[in-house]
Amino acid sequence: MAKDPKQMTGYLYVLAAAVLWSLIGPFSKICMEEGLAPLEVAFWRALLGGICFFAQTGICGGARIPVKHALFFCLFGVLSISVFFSSLQISIQLSGAAMAMVLLYTAPAWVAVFSRILFHESFSSRKGIALGLALFGTALVCFSGGSLNAEPSVLGIVCGLISGLCYASHFPFYVWWQPRYSTATLYAYMLLGGALALFPFVDFAPTRSWTAWANLLALGVVTNYGAYLAYGRSLQSINQVKAAIIGNIEPVLATFWVWLFWNENFSAYGWAGSALVISAVFLLTADRS
């Protein structure tokens, strides 16, 4: 238990971020139950979150950057946002929200690989063990049939892994650009690029229910802008290692929500694989190197 009030505030902020991120699955499932296609859900999440980040940069400064950098961030957003958000939504639809979030959390394993290739970071035995656990756990989750208790969906599995890969691409990008630009500025332009790439797949049907719009708004503002804002505030009080470890509660909570409200559940193999993936993430995030 932290005695320092500032440190305790940091723990509460990162816990809030994890809770908000864990709601991606439930909000997305409701939107798709209301008749929205996965790519349309991804578009509105990117657009509404991007509006919030642009509003922040407009108020605090940082929206005006060199054109070449703005274009690069938007282009990067096509991969890191449009493909990321849409593949995650497709995985949620085909394999279940619980499985999609576990596959998304293979991202730290990809980050370890990127760090070795791009930044020549040492590859410790801890990282090797973690990658082995992540790979074996992912295989068990994939062959378990997912959390919908159905036949394994190849497309759902592939999209879940792609979402983890795209999410992992954020980290080396931040390492390179954050000394020059704020997180709000980077996300504003990345989300703009992602929304523009997804725009052709949206039909803008005027008959959407209030339930659909409320959950789309929650996806964009709560799970996107609010979660990253809380996570950023946590890093002002605690270090990244502690924040990352506490943040790993996200897939556990995400699984709990869809079990509670939609009766999504893994088989024994699926639970074992999920435990291995989450254990691998703990090993990687606890590695101070």
Image (tube, rainbow, N blue to C red):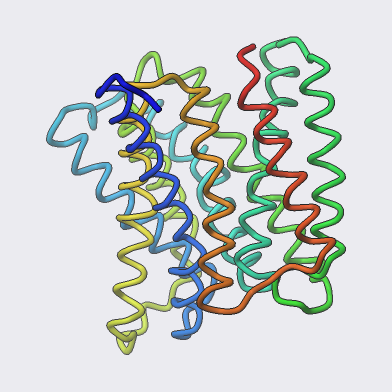
* Foreground pick, 289 / 171: 289
Residue 193 percent location from the top left of the image: 43, 46
* Foreground pick, 209 / 30: 30
Residue located 42% across and 55% down the image: 195
Residue located 38% across and 63% down the image: 44
The vertical placement of 260 against 78, above or below, is below
Which quarter shows the N terminus? Answer: top left
Residue located 37% across and 35% down the image: 231
Please identify the residue farthest to the left as the structure is shown.
59
Residue located 52% across and 76% down the image: 37
Task: Write down the quadrant of residue 270 in the picture.
Answer: bottom right
Position of residue 236 in the picture relative to residue 273 (left or right) = left
The vertical placement of 210 against 180, above or below, is below
Residue 90 percent location from the top left of the image: 62, 67
Please identify the residue farthest to the bottom as the structure is shown.
207
The vertical placement of 10 against 138, above or below, is above
Position of residue 70 in the picture relative to residue 158 (left or right) = left
The vertical placement of 243 against 226, above or below, is above
* Foreground pick, 158 / 83: 158
Position of residue 71 in the picture relative to residue 109 (left or right) = left
Which quarter shows the C terminus? Answer: top right
Position of residue 181 in the picture relative to residue 139 (left or right) = left
* Foreground pick, 222 / 68: 222
Residue 144 percent location from the top left of the image: 84, 66
Residue 210 percent location from the top left of the image: 27, 82
Number of marks drawn: 0
